[in-house]
Amino acid sequence: MRSAKDFFAPLAVGAPAPVREIPARPSRAIHFFDPGNPKMAAKVPDMVGKVDVLLGNLEDAIKADSKVAAREGLVRIGQETEGLGGPGASTQLWTRINALDSPWVLDDLLTLVPAIGHKLDVIMVPKVQGAEDIQYVDRLLAQLEAKAGLERPILVHAILETARGVANVEEICGASPRMQGLSLGPADLAADRRMKTTRVGGGHPGYLVRQDPPRGEDGAAQVDAQRTTYQQDLWHYTIARMVDACAMHGIYPYYGPFGDIADVVACEDQFRNAFLLGCVGTWSLHPKQIAIANRVFSPSVEDIAHARRVVAAMGDGTGAVMLDGKMEDDASLKQCLVLVELAEQLAAIDPELKQQYDAIDAPTGQEA
């Protein structure tokens, strides 16, 4: 057994000390790009400051014969792009490495950490099964950081893409001080669970509830009558469990990909469901999804106005007050403080949001 004190000791001589608290950096959209694709790579400098996270993808969607080009492209982008990655950068730099059972992952880490480890904020690890996967990456990163002379540890983000990973979600979240958060990987998870859907995220018309049948004059149920149906969310349970595990360990949950790029309406609905459940951001597979994510994962002006009113009215946080005919108490205050804190973080990096939030008039008037 390890002492609790050992948990925050470097895993390699000369490695930076592990973080004791994961910084709350806005990451509404994690925008994926292929760093080996010249057209995509050329767009990266113009996206800095316009998206919270740019992620150089090395895993799925990168063909086997393009792995080296993608890795080398990411090194060039990290070295040459101003304002991308590292403390205080306007846009974070993340990467998704290849799976731990692949022939490419070791070269990913051996190349990236020495070359751009000072710019890399987070390494996303796919298909995490349990704590042992995170601990393997944790030890290896410490050794590479020590060798490269890095002054801060690179954080780790796990993707839930297997049934075993979901079953072990709590231990994954607590496996290392490096753990930054979790993302839902719906496509691989659906396959691993043998779910009968070929969609990448989102609901399914076959997963529904149906209104009870009306009854005739004789009291018999008319099961053949027309009845309203309501499509359900296939991912509600998994997202909620992921959110709880992340909150328990002080790290951050994210919705993953929404594969139907053209259906921006359903995409926004899915993102909003995740936001309301507690996710702090989502993946973006196309530039049009960045705007959706930024809008959905930023609290509305109306919500912030109400939250500020509650905070002002609650004073020392004890007791209860009435605002607009509704009771607000200490539990309400805690909910509102979450929104107010998020608004402050987003206003610091988003001038348009700052202008909107600053324009809010937050009266403190309360009803008796």
Image (cartoon, grey):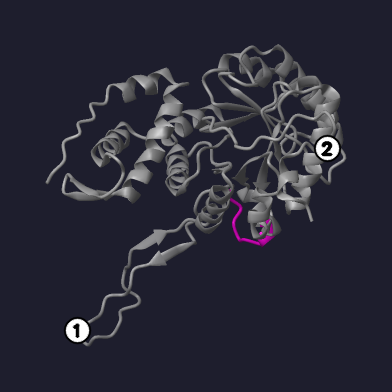
* Residue at image coords 49%, 61%: 206
Identify the secondary structure beneath mark 2.
helix
- The percent coordinates of residue 271 (x first, y second) are 47, 42
Q: Which numbered disc flags the more N-terminal residue, 2 or 1? A: 2
Measuring from the top left, give residue 103's x and y in whole percent: 87, 40
- Res 65 → quadrant: top right
Is 162 located above or below residue 290 in the figure?
A: below
Q: Is residue 115 above or below residue 128?
A: above
Q: Is mark 1 on a helix, strand or loop?
A: loop
Residue 296 lies in magenta, yes or no? no
Q: Where is residue 161 in the image (x, y as percent from the top left)?
A: 67, 51
Residue type, label 1? Glu
Residue 140 - label? 2
295 vs 305, left or right, is right
Q: Which amino acid does label 2 sit on?
A: Leu
Residue 302 place in picture, x, y as percent? 28, 35
Which span is picked out in magenta? Answer: 191-199
Q: Residue at x 59, y 56 (%)?
A: 197
Task: Name the residue carrying label 1.
Answer: 217
